[in-house]
Image (cartoon, rainbow, N blue to C red):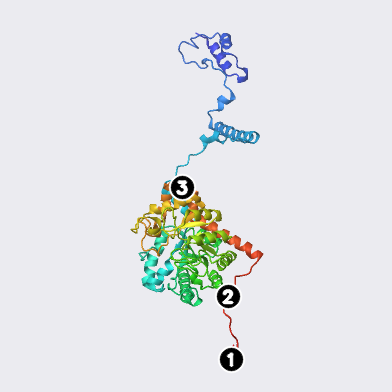
Amino acid sequence: MTSPVGCKLTQKTMSRRPDDEEPAENMSEKLGASSGGCGDGDDVEGQIPRARAPESFLMRHLGNPKYLLPLIAVVFLTALHFNGFLAKRADVDLSDAFEFFRPRPVPLTLDERVDRILSSSPLIDTHIDLPIFARALYQNHIYNENFTVPFKEGGMVGNIDIPRLQTGRVGGVFWSVFTSCPPTGLDPNEEFKDEVYYESIHDTIQQIDVMKRLVRAYPHDFGWATSSREFEQVFKSSRGRKVASVLGIEGLHQIGNSPAAIRLFYEVGVRYITLTHNCNNQYADGALVEKPHWGGLNPILGPQLIQEFNRLGMIVDLSHVSPATMRDVLIVTKAPVIFSHSSAYALTNHPRNVPDDVLELVKKNGGVVQINFAPDFITQTGDGKATLEDVADHVAYIGEKIGWEHVGFGSDFDGIPTVPVGLEDVSKYPALVKELLTRGISDDDVRRVTGLNVLRVWREVERIAKDIQLEEDQELEDDVKRINLDSKMDL
């Protein structure tokens, strides 16, 4: 048994400062400590514990959150600094070394990707025939209840109404101002006279008016755009809730041989004109005319008119024109063109579609082909039946052949007698976008297809027009009939 004095000595020894600590074996020798400790099993104050190795500063404080968390932060920041230092010195990227610390993003579903695409960029349809539909069914009386109720609340005959536009996430439309071609079978010397086109001009003015009134009547759902910048502003300011609205004219028979009419139509919001409809005119040949008149562009008036389009900033639309006209225009135009509602001839050999050699010219020109949804343009069955997948086939064909920068949507809704299964109206656009994503087309390329390609073309047309106007701003003048003045004429 150790004496009480020895136990007191042990207590005193164990209370020494850490700097005075001695090895455990020396301490035992000095105290003469035995394995029995102080007393015979008594709980004696000051009993010598089993000797322990001295603790370092790190070991004493590592378990204390007060010190541990700052220590981890210092180590992490030092590592980041070291990473940047080495990257600068060795021209290497060590970011992969910290991949473990990065959060793993959860992949978006297809529906979420569709939503992200249509929220961030406008879906644009470059050819919808609502104006002629309003004329044919409602005689342009858009304030009558039989028009306003179904148009505003849904269920309207055809492919368009406000609820379906909203469901389809449609961001913008080029509304087609269409009037029929003049009667066919005229004497060749009479075919292109001004008088032949008077009714066409008259009806065109009425169709422009009805569409402008319609947009004005629903200011929360539509917004006018006369430039690419205004178009984007309508989409962004309304967060996609408004349909940015632009006008397009479907054939030069609607200008009555007058370049002056083109300029006036531009002033009221028309931003593209199709060079022909299903008839020839004094400027170009159409695709569905049995006998061509010019063999393409009129060799004199045609290039002059294209130059006026380029100077003015009017987009050239090559839908409805003959393949020869397509090739001629793509040689002489300084600005990119559009096909507002045509498809790929290689998949469906309809004369309204675009041949492969012309597609290559479109690529060089920087233009865009907007796919038509008419079943006869997208299938070879001849039974008027088609599907959403057929439309996607044409989009994919052109995108893969000449690039995703050169294809888009031009449905021809309200202007075609039948529609594809799955694309019955404008509300089905998200399903088409989803189908493109399902085929492995990237989100960025789908954005190009849905609308960015059209905006790119429009911006380039505007830029070229400004350049031309800076160099020489002379309009193409009309050739008007001479007026014979005499003394009897009342002026």
The answer to whether residue 322 of the structure is visible from this angle is yes
Task: Please tell me whether residue 488 is drawn above or below residue 13 in the rendered image.
Answer: below
Rendered image: mark on residue 488: 1
246 or 297, which is in the foreground? Answer: 297
In three-dimensional space, the C-alpha distance between marks 2 and 3, rounded to whole angstroms, equals 51 Å
Numbered mark located on residue 441 in the image:
3
Question: Mark 1 and mark 3 in contact (Cβ < 8 Å)?
Answer: no
Q: Which residue is mark 2?
A: 479
Where residue 372 sits, quadrant-wise, is: bottom left
Q: Earlier in the sequence, mark 2 or mark 3?
A: 3
From what the image shows, is residue 257 above or below residue 173?
Answer: below
Tell me the SS state at disc 2: loop
Q: Earlier in the sequence, mark 3 or mark 1?
A: 3
* Residue 233 coordinates in the image, percent (x, y): 53, 60
Could you tell me residue 129's position as x and y percent? Answer: 43, 66
Say which amino acid is labelled 1: Lys
**Element assignment for label 1:** loop
Q: Look at the numbered discs 1 and 2 and tell me whether their residues touch, using CB distance below 8 Å.
A: no
User: Please, what secondary structure does the residue beneath circle 3 have?
Assistant: loop
Q: Position of residue 253 (x, y in %)?
A: 48, 71
The 10 Å Cα crowd at callout 3, few under 14, some 14 to 19, many 20 or more, is some
Residue type, mark 2 in image = Asp
